[in-house]
Image: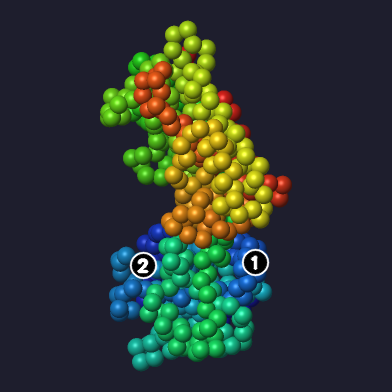
Amino acid sequence: MKLNSIIFRGLIPLTFLASSLTSQYWTVDSEVRNEIRKAKLQNQLPAIMKEYGISLWLTMNRDPNDDPDNIFWDRYKRLDPVSEMIGAENTFYPAIFIFTDRGERIAFVEDGDLPYIEATGIYTTIDHYKYARQTGIEPMMKFLRAEVSRINPSKIGINMSETEPVADGLTAGLRKVLETVLGKEFADRLVSAEDIIVTLWGQKLSRELENVRRSAQIANDLMMDAFKNVKPGKTTAKDIFDFIRARMKANGWEVGWDQKTCPIVRIKPSGDLLQDKIVAVPGSIISLNAGVLTKGYSNDLDRTAYILREKESKPPDEILAMWSTLRRAVEAVVESMKRGALGVDVDRKSRDIIKSAGYEEYWYQTGHPVGVWVHDIGTFIGPRHPHYGRKVELRLHEGEVFAIEPGVSIFSKELNGQIGLHLQEMVVVTRKGGEYLIPPQKEIFLIK
């Protein structure tokens, strides 16, 4: 590792700055943050770049404030979202970060930002400059010209995308500066780094997988315990919500998404009532979706129960038919989730089963990635919708985790209301194909 040494200028104590900075995007716990992202950039990134034929990936950062003297005070950071993935979230002055398919990880930062970049342990080469109003970012541009000429990449990936916000961090102004600095020879080699970013973000290391797995197992146990505590005719949707949240608080578990909607509790059929007015009565379907954070990683898992009516030993046939259809759809998806399969092709397996069973096709994706966000960045298992962009055209990679969630809905004459079932399981892509992250729910939980 090449580390050019400097003496930190010390405008403000480093400890103050570090304590005042908070994560915006890649919400991994600080205790494992550097370890995980260094491993991802070192072990996963070169192969991903080679897969997409991009030999150099470039990220340019600068603070939105127009005067460098102001950047040390409280302000809203609008940095490139990729910054946190590459360890650059604490850079305040203009900076450049270069990655090559040969495994080089190069940072060029201002003197005051150097300690932060050194502390990440990510970069194999770190160089620095002193920002001055007289020269602006010219030292940075000179460095960039020299490095790009040295590497002579066939394609240069930059953070621009029409459909993926996380991969669209390069501003129009910096893009223009970049093209001018590189000249036509290299400017003609600029391409979107969207596929690199989506795949790197979505492909999980084994230690990331364990965090997601732990989150899913805790959430599963919470929901099953909630079912066991339902008292038909008395328990409301709010009671179930409060039960799960109380357990989470007692154990120090953070919610996986918004405080007001985690967990999601649905009791059907029911009218348009407030949560504290919806009572779980015999003949009700209870659907729970609970999320728990483990070291900054979430889960997305559904569990379903049915409250038996008098003299019933099983749910009505129409509910069992819905459940059976969804189970077959999920199994077909899991079987198809082989490394290298296209997201859009895997999605079709579920839809074909749903439609052939006579149900209306659901409007959303069959599977979305799960990780540091409950709806994470990564390949999508979905249809060709404009919103999904290129993500459904990407191939599945080993280590990607998905929430597989087909759904069906009908009007039940027997239960006199609209009912829907939403089966959601978490599946990881392995060398052998799709595998459940935790044991799936194969039967509807019955409440007597």
Q: Residue at x 52, y 16 (%)?
A: 314
Numbered disc total:
2
For mark 1, give the secondary structure: helix
Q: Is residue 295 above or below residue 102?
A: above
Residue 184 position, x and y percent, is 51, 89
Q: Residue at x 61, y 57 (%)?
A: 395
Quadrant of the rendered structure where residue 416 is? Answer: top left
* Contact? badges 1 and 2 (CB < 8 Å): no
Mark 2, residue position: 78
- One can see residue 288 in this view: no
Residue 135 position, x and y percent, is 39, 91
Residue 1 position, x and y percent, is 63, 76
Residue 317 position, x and y percent, is 51, 19
Q: Is residue 98 above or below residue 384?
A: below
Q: Amino acid at mark 2?
A: Arg
Measure the C-alpha gap from mark 1 to mark 2. Answer: 30 Å
Q: Is residue 242 above or below residue 88?
A: above
- Counting other residues with Cα less than 10 Å from the Cα at mark 2, is it few (<14), some (14-19), or many (20 or more)? few
Q: Amino acid at mark 1?
A: Glu
Q: How is the image coloured?
A: rainbow
For marks 1 and 2 on the same chain, the one whose residue lies earlier in the sequence? 1
Quadrant of the rendered structure where residue 247 is? Answer: top left
Give the label on residue 213, or none: none
Q: Nearer the viewer, mark 1 or mark 2?
A: 1
In this rendered view, identify the residue nearer to me: 257 or 95.
Answer: 257
Left or right? Give the position of 214 relative to 240.
Answer: right
Mark 1, residue position: 51
